[in-house]
Amino acid sequence: MLSIQDQIKNQIGTAENILILTKPKASGDAIAASWGLFHLLKSIGKNPTILESDSQKEKLKFLPAPEKQEREIVGARDFVLSFNTTRNKIIDFRTENKLDSFDIYITPEKETIDPRDFSFITAKFKYDLLVVLGCQNLENFGEMREKNADLFFEVPIVNIDNASANENFGQINFVDITASSLSGIIAELAKTHWEKFTNSDISRCFLTGLVSATSNFQNQKTTPQTFLTASWLIEKGADQQEIIRHLLKTQSFSFMKLWGRVMARLNWDEGRKLAWSLVSIEDFVQSRSKLTDLPVILEKIKDNFSAGRFFAVLYSESLDRSVALIKNSETESLRDIQKIMGGEIKNGHLEVIFEGKNIVEAEKEFLEKMK
């Protein structure tokens, strides 16, 4: 029986037009992995397309971006209006695109046309394969999946992930929960099957994903295999120091001010292995920071408390509406918290809204439920 890696190689080998997908607001590792895969597929003669993501665009602008990116899935399938010319030839045609219609004018050899000679044919999708990176389930795609249900149902899916919560929704599922990063998984595929096609642009993308996922090989995700993969990518032309300069550069002054306020209020519950902090509306105003800074701060709290199991930042959206962002070291436990608190899992953290509660009331309810 073929290994999963060999199955992926064969599936890619038989495909021509390949769509690469990551979930909205994907991590730096997922975006870097998707970019590296795009360049790898091009180098082996495929025609890849990637769904554009703005979540890491500024952060990864030093990398070679894929030249074929789509904002949304459009025109994924052709439809054919066929005319049987056995009894009546078509000698000319033209089209006209009107405000509310698209008209096709045909000129038959004979004056009359039998409507029975027309047929409407559903053609195949323009993509032969979907490669989905870092998505635990297809619900991650939300409205995009609903609008393109047939695409996800009929086109083969290669599902690559390193999260234990992955629901194995693909025809081929490569879910390695021991892997430090998505980039590392795909880099190993490249090393095994397409080493001679792996150039410096490809290796830069994959090494960037490794550095991003492991905080420059310093967090608990780092394994001996991580270093072996990184060493190979450096041999293939990736410049680790360049990546560190761009990826781990000093945060903005506003971010650091907010980070300082969060750390000043940081609480630790030894029994529950829970670290949490509060952020007020005034904190955002005084630091001139943004809500989008909070997931990064939450990740930094997690990285700095290796003994912790749960990490949270609670912030005020208004005087009577508060939100908790909750992260953990075990994805299964995050789903258990979701069952108790509700909310929605987004990009590796749980977002819970406390309607009608100020930040102090929300903290009290949060701690009660965490028991």
Image (cartoon, rainbow, N blue to C red):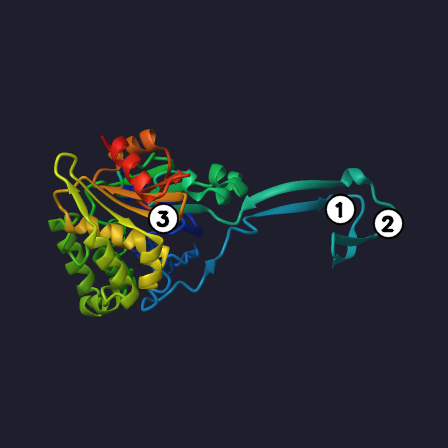
- According to the picture, the residue beneath numbered tag 1 turns out to be 85
Whether pointer 1 and pointer 2 mark residues with C-beta atoms closer than 8 Å, the reply is: no
Q: Earlier in the sequence, mark 1 or mark 3?
A: 1
Q: Quadrant of the N terminus?
A: top left
Task: Give percent across and percent down for residue 29.
Answer: 28, 54
| Residue 226, above or below 320 | below
Secondary structure state at the residue bearing disc 1: loop
- According to the picture, the residue beneath numbered tag 2 turns out to be 110
Q: Quadrant of residue 311?
A: top left
- Few, some or many C-alpha atoms within 10 Å of disc 1 (few <14, some 14-19, many ≥20)? few
Taking the spot 22% from the left edge, 64% from the top edge, the residue there is 248
Q: Earlier in the sequence, mark 2 or mark 3?
A: 2
Cα distance in 3D space between marks 1 and 3: 69 Å
Taking the spot 44% from the left edge, 51% from the top edge, the residue there is 19
Disc assigned to residue 246: none
Q: From the viewer's perspective, tell me whether residue 295 is left or right of residue 222.
A: right
- Which mark is in front, 1 or 3? 3
Secondary structure state at the residue bearing disc 2: loop
Task: Give percent across and percent down for residue 54.
Answer: 41, 58
Q: Quadrant of residue 205?
A: bottom left
Q: From the viewer's perspective, tell me whether residue 346 is left or right of residue 297.
A: right
Whether pointer 2 and pointer 3 mark residues with C-beta atoms closer than 8 Å, the reply is: no
Q: Quadrant of residue 84?
A: top right
| Whether residue 33 can be seen here | yes
For badge 1, the amino acid type reads Thr
